[in-house]
Image: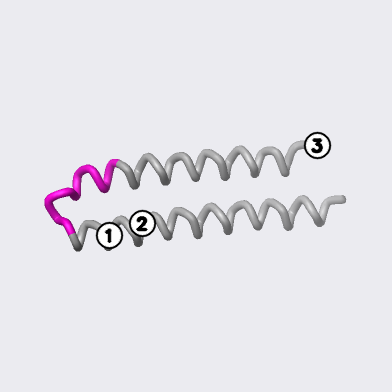
């Protein structure tokens, strides 16, 4: 049963990386369109990225748990 856990952990890491990358790209697009709102956009981006990373860690620990 070790292989499914390794695959699951890899999928968690890939999914979290894709999610954070999409948030960063979308935030840069939004800042390019509305530079005056850059502070609010960056704050929202950092909060969302932190939440996704936290969920990724929780899922990773759940997969690695015996």
How dense is the environment of label 3, judged by Cα within 10 Å: few (below 14), some, or many (20 and up)?
A: few
Residue visible at 41% across and 43% down? Answer: 48
Left or right: 34 with respect to 18?
left
Task: Give the vertical position of 66 relative to 29 (above or below).
Answer: above
Left or right: 12 with respect to 52?
right
Disc 2 element: helix
The mark lying in front, picked from 3 and 1, is: 1
Whole-Å distance between the Cαs marked 2 and 1? 6 Å
Left or right: 29 with respect to 35?
right
Q: Which residue is mark 3?
A: 66
Q: Which residue is mark 1?
A: 28
Residue visible at 68% across and 51% down? Answer: 9
Disc 3 element: loop
Image coordinates for residue 51, horizontal then vertical, percent: 47, 40
The majority secondary structure of the magenta stretch comes to helix
How dense is the environment of label 1, judged by Cα within 10 Å: few (below 14), some, or many (20 and up)?
A: some
Q: Which residues are magenta?
A: 34-43
Disc 1 element: helix
Whole-Å distance between the Cαs marked 3 and 2? 34 Å
Q: Which residue is mark 2?
A: 24
Q: Are marks 2 and 1 in contact (CB under 8 Å)?
A: yes
Q: Is residue 40 magenta?
A: yes
The color scheme shown is one colour
Nearer the N terminus, badge 3 or badge 1? 1
Q: Which residue extends farthest right?
A: 1
Residue 6: name its quadrant: bottom right
Residue visible at 53% across and 52% down? Answer: 16
């Amino acid at each position: 049963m070790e292989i499914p856990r390794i695959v699951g952990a890899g999928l968690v890491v890939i999914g979290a990386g894709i999610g954070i990358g999409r948030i960063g790209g979308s935030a840069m697009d939004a800042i390019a369109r509305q530079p005056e709102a850059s502070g609010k956009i960056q704050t929202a981006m950092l909060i969302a990225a932190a939440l996704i990373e936290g969920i990724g860690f929780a899922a990773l620990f759940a997969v690695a748990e015996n």
